[in-house]
Image (spheres, helix red, strand yellow):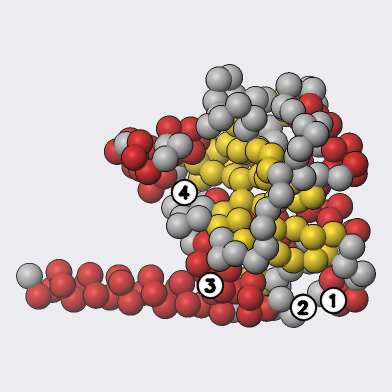
Amino acid sequence: MKTGIRWLLRAVFLLVFLAACGTFIPRPLIAPVEASSAAATHRILLLSGPIHTDIAIPLDEETRTAFSFLAETGFPLGHPDAEWLIIGWGGRAFYLETPSWSELKPLPVLRALTIDRSVLHVDLAGHITEPQPAVAAFDIGDDQMARLRDLISDSFVRDASVVAPIPDAGYGEIDRFFEAKGYFNALFGCNTWTAAALRSAGLRTGLWNPLPQSLRLSLGVYN
């Protein structure tokens, strides 16, 4: 009994230590000179929930052109009231089958804790009020925005250059799910994908950010 408790305490300590290192060791270790000197011409948002993060990029003409492949699938990219394109990456079972906490099921949770195929969730938003606790804003330059768009675009699975929407999958009338590259697990999941996307935009994150709270803290420290 005492041995079991000892091992449990060691495991908890190790997880706390790794989480602290992942938050406070920056990635990249040295701030990119290009990012710090670039003219900030675009505003992007990090949208945080209890366990998940999304990225919102302004739905200007450049974004509509870069993601025109979404419109070809019927996604309403040209919606007149839309100001933001919102993208999140996550585990297929949990993402598709848990639109709200009241609909939580054991199997999607099990898949999220082990390994699962991934999907991209794409949505639109109108005006987003700033500041608010769940929204963090960052200003980046033209090159950083182009790289962010490229990373997001490259995350879609394509068949002969055509992305793959998941039929009848979505939380509402506007949002859509698409097949995505990579596999999801609890240690390298939605928030580590978000962190990688933000690093492509010249921001610094923690070395390992599996939780929204860790990602937001490291972004606040290093940007």
Image depth: mark 1 or mark 4 in front: 1
Query: Residue 83's spot in the image, x, y percent?
Result: 77, 45
Give the amino acid at mark 2.
Answer: Ala
Residue nearer the viewer, 98 or 102: 102
Residue 135, percent from left and from top: 62, 61
* Pointer 1 residue: 36
Q: Secondary structure at mark 1?
A: helix
As measured in the structure, the alpha-carbon distance from the residue carrying label 3 to the one carrying label 1 is 23 Å
Task: Give the residue drawn at x 77%, y 78%.
Answer: 31
Q: Distance from label 1 to label 2 (Cα)?
A: 8 Å
The front one of 143 and 62 is 62
Disc 3 designates what residue?
Answer: 22
Residue 185 marker: 4
Q: Is residue 168 visible?
A: yes
Pick the quarter of the image with the N terminus.
bottom left
Disc 1 or 2, which lies upstream in sequence? 2
Front: mark 1 or 2: 1
Residue 75: mark in rendering: none
Residue receiving disc 2:
31
Disc with the residue nearer the chain's start (1 vs 4): 1
- Give the image location of residue 21, x and y in percent: 51, 77
Q: Earlier in the sequence, mark 2 or mark 3?
A: 3
**Which of the 4 image quadrants contains residue 32?**
bottom right
Residue 104 picture quarter: top left
